[in-house]
């Protein structure tokens, strides 16, 4: 089993910054992609940013130039630095990880999600 534990959400004024963190723990062979998604009530979960094990990144157009994703492979942790926050960025943010697990002499990749952390931006 793999657990993803998020931290760093909260309330911030528009124009402010927050840094989200997500650490993976458990038994696994390796962590492939990690990322952050957001979900508003009644809507589908959408990609905010993702990063591969090699450091390649991908961002939603709405956050390019304002958010930065990074990871510390030694700590199995992914970060999301959120700058110049806008009221429309307010949502629940979920950490995502694609993990390789060894089983029966084979590697299987599975997706895991964190419990979500609330980001609130006041105007």
Image (spheres, rainbow, N blue to C red):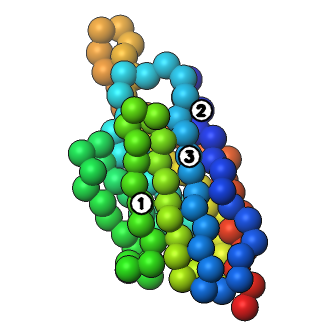
Residue 111 place in picture, x, y as percent: 46, 40
Residue indicated by mark 1 = 69
Residue 76, above or below 84:
above
Q: Which residue is mark 3?
A: 22
Query: How far is the residue under mark 2 from the one under mark 3?
Result: 10 Å
Q: Earlier in the sequence, mark 1 or mark 2?
A: 2
Q: Residue at x 49, y 54 (%)?
A: 79
Disc 3 to disc 1: CB gap under 8 Å: no
Foreground tag (1 vs 2): 1
**Mark before the other along the chain sequence, 3 or 1:** 3
Q: Quadrant of residue 69?
A: bottom left
Left or right: residue 109 compared with residue 94? left
Residue 3: numbered disc: 2
Local crowd size for mark 1, using a 10 Å CA cut-off: few (<14), some (14–19), many (≥20): many
Q: Is residue 8 visible?
A: yes
Of labels 2 and 3, earlier in sequence is 2
Q: Are marks 2 and 3 in contact (CB under 8 Å)?
A: no
* 68 in relation to 95, above or below: below
Q: Is residue 45 visible?
A: no
Between disc 2 and disc 3, the foreground one is 3
* Residue 60 placement, left or right of 89: left
**Camera-nearest residue between 10 and 28:** 10
Label 1: which secondary element: strand
Identified at 41% across, 66% down, the residue is 68
Q: Relative to residue 91, is residue 103 depicted above or below?
A: above
Residue 109 figure quarter: top left
Q: Note whether 102 is above or below 96 in the view shown.
A: above
Report x, y in % for residue 112: 52, 40
Alpha carbon separation for disc pair 1 and 2: 20 Å
Is label 1 in contact with label 2 (beta carbons under 8 Å)? no
The residues tagged by marks 3 and 1 sit, at their Cα atoms, a distance apart of 11 Å
């Amino acid at each position: 089993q793999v657990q993803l534990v998020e931290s760093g959400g909260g309330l911030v004024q528009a124009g402010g910054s927050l840094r989200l963190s997500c650490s993976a723990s458990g038994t696994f062979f390796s962590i492939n992609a990690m990322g952050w998604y957001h979900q508003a009530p009644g809507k589908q979960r959408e990609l905010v940013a993702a990063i591969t094990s090699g450091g390649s990144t991908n961002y939603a157009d709405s956050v390019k130039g304002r958010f930065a994703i990074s990871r510390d492979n030694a700590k199995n942790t992914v970060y999301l630095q959120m700058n110049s926050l806008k009221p429309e960025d307010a949502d629940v943010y979920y950490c995502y990880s694609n993990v390789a697990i060894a089983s029966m002499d084979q590697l299987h990749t599975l997706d895991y999600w964190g419990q979500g952390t609330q980001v609130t931006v006041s105007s």
